[in-house]
């Protein structure tokens, strides 16, 4: 999660190879809950930042995704 983005994004993937990150809130499947709206005033910049890390790890090893994320953020100058 980029701390500069207004909210966490959610991800989904399809079996035909598409991976999508969505910066807008998930909406309720049933209309019992109100929809969450994202309002942006005209003329106001709205910027989102993303990075993706694709890796392969052998079954007998472990992958520290938190360390990898910290390293990735640091390489972009986002870590504090």
Image (cartoon, rainbow, N blue to C red):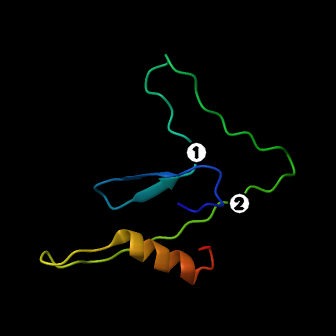
Return the x and y of residue 28 as percentages of the image width and height.
Answer: 47, 28
Label of residue 47 in the image:
2
Q: Give the residue displayed 45% in from the left and 56% down from the top.
A: 20
The C terminus - image quarter: bottom right
Q: Earlier in the sequence, mark 1 or mark 2?
A: 1
Q: Is residue 3 left or right of residue 13?
A: right
> Is residue 12 positioned above or below 58 on the image?
above
- Say whether residue 53 is visible: no
Closer to the camera in the image, 42 or 66: 66
Q: Residue furthest front?
A: 80
Q: Is residue 61 left or right of residue 21?
A: left
Return the x and y of residue 42 as percentages of the image width and height.
Answer: 85, 46
Return the x and y of residue 19 as percentages of the image width and height.
Answer: 40, 59
Q: Secondary structure at mark 2?
A: loop
> Residue 47 lies in what quarter of the image?
bottom right
Q: Give the residue displayed 36% in from the left and 70% down from the top.
A: 65
Q: Residue furthest left?
A: 60
Q: Label 1 crowding class (10 Å Cα cut-off): few <14, some 14-19, many 20+?
A: some
Label of residue 79 in the image:
none
- Say whether residue 72 is visible: yes
Total numbered labels placed on residues in the image: 2
Q: Residue furthest bottom?
A: 75
Closer to the camera in the image, 20 or 4: 4
Question: Which residue is tagged 1?
Answer: 24
Q: Secondary structure at mark 1?
A: loop
């Amino acid at each position: 999660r980029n701390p500069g983005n207004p909210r966490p994004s959610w991800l989904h993937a399809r079996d035909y190879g598409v991976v999508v990150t969505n910066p807008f809130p998930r909406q309720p499947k049933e209309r019992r809950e109100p929809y969450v709206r994202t309002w942006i005033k005209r003329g106001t910049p709205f910027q989102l930042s993303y990075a993706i890390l694709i890796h392969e790890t052998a079954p007998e090893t472990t992958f520290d995704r938190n360390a990898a994320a910290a390293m990735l953020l640091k390489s972009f100058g986002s870590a504090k």
